């Protein structure tokens, strides 16, 4: 007799006692007790797909912005955006009530071989996650299992149930459980991914998640056996904590980054850590030897290049002899940096001056890659991808799209490039504002394929001559309205001297809505337009990317101002979050979004 799985795909369950094996597809804890409101506030209900048609699973909050569950709930998921819309309700024992918090799943990170998946929420919760056990379950140990699944007499109970189970045979990945008396409880459809909890005098720990069950006693089942299989997570702490919590200092607020180009030819990467108050603090921890870089020809890229959920920086440099190099500065958890990892050099690739670079996770593997447009001497343009390795270095560039010279393409100086997941498929795409020779403006997007390459671009938005001049616009990309799609913002200088932040929100098809203006100012009230540069990140941890503006004052001091994003993707008035009279020259600062 085969044990039924909870997930929406056919998988094989581990045989532990010789009597249990995996088999057919399946979607609370039968003969368990209802969990009181406010108890087990870390347990999550996942509604996967169209309500009433899709499936449901249970999970556990392991970080304010991450839930763990059984990977079969999503079929055989790949890293990236969930294949169907998923609503996650946490801390609500009675789903018909109003307690707890509701979020949308935006990203999946499956374990490579364990059958569990981490689910990123669109914004952090304020609920307390469950502690992670680091001790393996032992035969005979009693754990408490919880879930939102069916019961003996209700198809969709909408209520969290729990009961105690005794541990049977244990192997390296899974273990058997059987319900304890009275009633010998079991697990049903909808319980998949729910927590197996070790309760001690010191609190509650997550020991495993539900994987498979005979479903005996469940409504609609004529099976009598009630054994189940749990997936161990006690030995996955390092993997979980490497992904969740993400961000520096485990605070769910992203941090601003820059590289400083010293006059001696040295470089130093800096992180500006963001406090709960919004204030930023500069941290570096590494400075290269003098003369190591030709700082006049240096591009900076930002991203999680080694997949450890901490933002790193990379420097693309052209030496005086024309040799190109790509170095990665890996960030540590405290915001300081390691020395450079040089992974690629070339003397034959081409000219530094013919490149436009941007960064994003183009193949959806959790590591940020680098892409570059190259302008050939015949005025054609090619697109290359440097795919990130596990150590944070990069492979050799691979060519994908190339466009022959046309009346509308050919001058890379007319391009402003950026990256974002414009269509929500879990892979970053590339965008470019292009100013045509007739002064019309086009926003193009290149949609990444699973290999990290790119087909021909699509026209995502356009305007006829007279709309404006992209040369008076500074571009930055991010998910500014928190809907999981990458948007575009432009700091625009009108001909009359007024300034405004324009937002082009992304549509599900990868195109963009017409821009709208939010924060507005003037050069007299804000300051010099050409002494302002921008970077994006979720600096307040609310699930929407914000914008930080670096400003260079006439007295030589520097400041960072944060423009927090509104729910519609617009921006609030900037607030000064850091300033220094001695940090260094504005001209020596390199931000990832700079279009050098």
Image (spheres, rainbow, N blue to C red):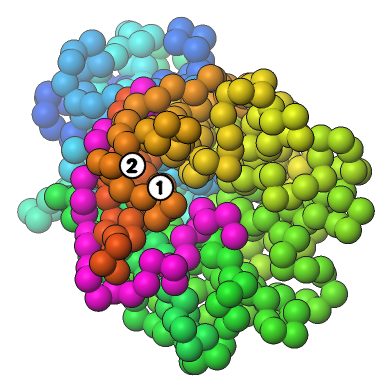
* Disc ID at residue 529: 1
| 348 to the left or right of 135 | right
Q: Please provide percent x and percent y for residue 297.
A: 62, 72
The residue at 25%/16% (across/down) is 95
Question: Which residue is situated farthest in the left direction here?
Answer: 201
| 314 to the left or right of 217 | right
Whether residue 589 is visible to the viewer of this picture, yes or no, is: yes
Q: What stretch is highlighted in magenta?
A: 568-596
Which image quadrant for residue 41?
top left
* Disc ID at residue 523: 2
* Disc ID at residue 595: none
Which image quadrant for residue 564?
top left
The residue at 70%/50% (across/down) is 413
Q: Please provide percent x and percent y for residue 303.
A: 50, 58
Neighbor class of circle 1 (other Cα within 10 Å; few <14, some 14-19, many 20+) is some
> What kind of element bears circle 2?
loop
Look at the image and say whether residue 581 sits in the magenta stretch: yes
């Amino acid at each position: 007799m085969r044990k039924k799985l909870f997930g929406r795909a056919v998988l094989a369950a581990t045989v532990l006692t010789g009597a249990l094996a995996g088999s057919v597809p399946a979607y609370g804890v039968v003969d368990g007790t209802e969990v009181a409101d406010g108890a087990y506030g870390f347990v999550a209900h996942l509604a996967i797909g169209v309500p009433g048609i899709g499936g449901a699973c249970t999970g556990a909050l392991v970080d304010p912005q991450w839930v763990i569950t059984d990977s079969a709930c999503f079929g055989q998921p790949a890293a990236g955006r969930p294949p169907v819309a998923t609503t996650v309700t946490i801390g609500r024992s009675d789903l018909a009530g109003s307690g707890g918090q509701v979020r949308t799943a935006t990203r999946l990170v499956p374990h490579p071989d364990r059958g569990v998946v981490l689910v990123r929420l669109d914004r952090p919760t304020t609920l307390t996650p469950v502690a992670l056990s680091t001790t393996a379950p032992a035969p005979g140990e009693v754990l408490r299992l919880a879930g939102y699944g069916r019961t003996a007499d209700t198809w969709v109970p909408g209520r969290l149930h729990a009961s105690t189970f005794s541990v049977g045979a244990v192997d390296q990945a899974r273990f058997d459980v059987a319900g304890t008396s009275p009633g010998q409880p079991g697990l049903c459809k909808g319980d998949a991914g729910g927590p197996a909890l070790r309760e001690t005098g010191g609190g509650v720990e997550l020991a495993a998640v539900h994987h498979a069950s005979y479903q005996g006693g469940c409504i609609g089942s004529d099976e009598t056996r009630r054994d189940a299989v749990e997936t161990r997570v006690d030995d996955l702490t390092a993997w979980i904590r490497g992904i969740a919590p993400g961000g520096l200092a485990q605070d769910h607020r992203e941090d601003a980054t820059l590289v400083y180009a010293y006059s001696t030819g040295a470089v130093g990467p800096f992180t500006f850590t963001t406090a709960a108050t919004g204030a930023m603090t500069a941290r570096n921890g590494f400075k290269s030897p003098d003369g190591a870089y030709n700082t006049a020809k240096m591009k900076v890229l930002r991203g999680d290049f080694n997949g450890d959920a901490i933002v790193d920086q990379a420097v693309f440099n052209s030496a005086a002899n024309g040799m190109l190099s790509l170095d990665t500065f890996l960030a540590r958890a405290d915001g300081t940096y390691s020395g450079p990892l040089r992974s690629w050099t070339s003397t034959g690739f081409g000219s530094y001056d013919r490149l436009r670079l941007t960064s994003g996770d183009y193949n959806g593997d959790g590591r940020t890659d680098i892409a570059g447009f190259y302008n050939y001497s015949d005025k054609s343009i090619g697109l290359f991808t440097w795919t990130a390795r596990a150590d944070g270095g990069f492979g050799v560039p691979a060519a994908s799209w190339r466009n022959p010279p046309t009346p509308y393409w050919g001058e890379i100086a007319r391009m402003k490039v950026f990256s974002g997941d414009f269509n929500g498929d879990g892979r970053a795409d590339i965008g470019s504002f292009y100013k045509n020779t007739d002064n019309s403006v086009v926003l193009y997007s290149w949609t990444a394929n699973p290999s990290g390459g790119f087909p021909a671009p699509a026209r995502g938005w356009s305007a006829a001559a007279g709309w404006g001049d992209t040369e008076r616009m500074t571009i930055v990309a991010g998910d500014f309205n928190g809907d999981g799609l990458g948007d575009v913002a432009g700091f625009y200088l009108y001909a009359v001297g007024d300034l405004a932040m324009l937002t082009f929100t992304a549509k599900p098809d990868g195109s963009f809505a017409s821009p709208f203006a939010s924060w507005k100012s003037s050069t007299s009230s804000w300051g010099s337009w050409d002494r302002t540069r921008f970077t994006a990140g979720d600096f307040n941890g609310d699930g929407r990317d914000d914008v930080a503006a670096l400003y260079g004052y006439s007295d030589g001091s520097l400041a960072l101002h944060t423009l927090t994003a509104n729910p519609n993707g617009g921006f609030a008035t900037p607030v000064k979050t850091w300033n220094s009279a001695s940090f260094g020259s504005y001209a020596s600062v390199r931000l990832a979004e700079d279009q050098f």
